[in-house]
Amino acid sequence: MTPAFPTYPSGLHRRIMLQPGDGWIGGALEDDMHRFHIRLDHAEGRVTRVAAKAVRHPWSACPGATHFIAKELIGELLADVGARDPAQHCTHLYDLAILAAAHADDTAPMRFDMTVADRVEDRTTATLYESGIETLRWQLDGTAIAGTTRDLRRLSQWKRELSPQEAEGATLLRRAVFVSGARAYVAPSLEQTAALNQGRMGVCFNYQLPQAESSTRTPNWHRDFSQSGHQPLEDFDPASAFAAM
């Protein structure tokens, strides 16, 4: 028999919070494997200052991505933040910067929650909530969306059929789906460098040279929110935290 599509929990819970301020926008992201914060100051449509933090991360080189993204984005047009080479950046910090830039003119905070059930025979259910309201739900068989001809690996092709808000939601949920696979990943020892994982080389800041040669696993980098009774960013006060960055 074909298995049913499992639902969360257990699985990945990823949360993103956006907080606009006077001439700035802050974004925070947390899931099982990552927690990053970023603040973009802006004036006349251009980034004037960047402050970022790597709070929890899987590799020792990840915090270096905060300095790199600041150097790359200061002076950039907000509209062009997403035009950099993503493989040079921390994937999650760069995604957060792109989302923050897109919402730089917002006047109210936003929260995105993404849940992805642990797979059963490669099937899962992925759901996106915006400020507590469900806006998108996919049943997935591999990377194919059940009941459609769409595949997540070809999102760049079919998201042009969507409204900007729908395309944003699809992009956020797809990233959560791909990140959720790390829940089944068996991490190497703390002493093993990223450069020994040849299949990953070049995909993000950590896996670029020279940092990959010395980057090792960070202790206590993994949490399971679906089993802990806690939620991502539950201790985070965005207004005060970003004002202080």
Image (cartoon, helix red, strand yellow):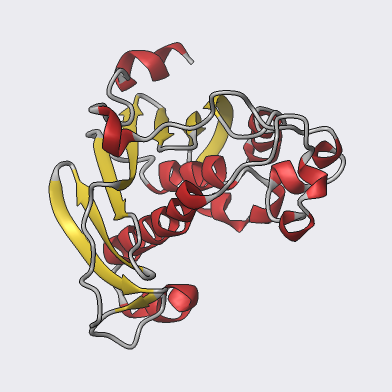
Residue 135 on image: x %, y %: 17, 58
Q: Is residue 193 left or right of residue 106?
A: right
The answer to which of 173 and 59 lies nearer the viewer is 59
Name, please, the residue furthest toward the bottom. Answer: 149
Q: Is residue 20 left or right of residue 71?
A: left
Q: Residue at x 68, y 32 (%)?
A: 217
Q: Residue at x 48, y 39 (%)?
A: 44
Residue 56 on image: x %, y %: 52, 26
The answer to which of 228 and 2 lies nearer the viewer is 2
Task: State the quadrant of the N terminus.
Answer: bottom left
Looking at the picture, does residue 26 appear above or below residue 102? above
Q: Is residue 160 left or right of residue 187?
A: left
Q: Is residue 206 left or right of residue 83?
A: right
Q: Residue at x 79, y 56 (%)?
A: 198
Looking at the picture, does residue 22 appear above or below residue 76? above
Residue 6 on image: x %, y %: 23, 62
Name, please, the residue furthest toward the front. Answer: 1
Residue 4 on image: x %, y %: 20, 71
Q: Residue at x 22, y 34 (%)?
A: 108
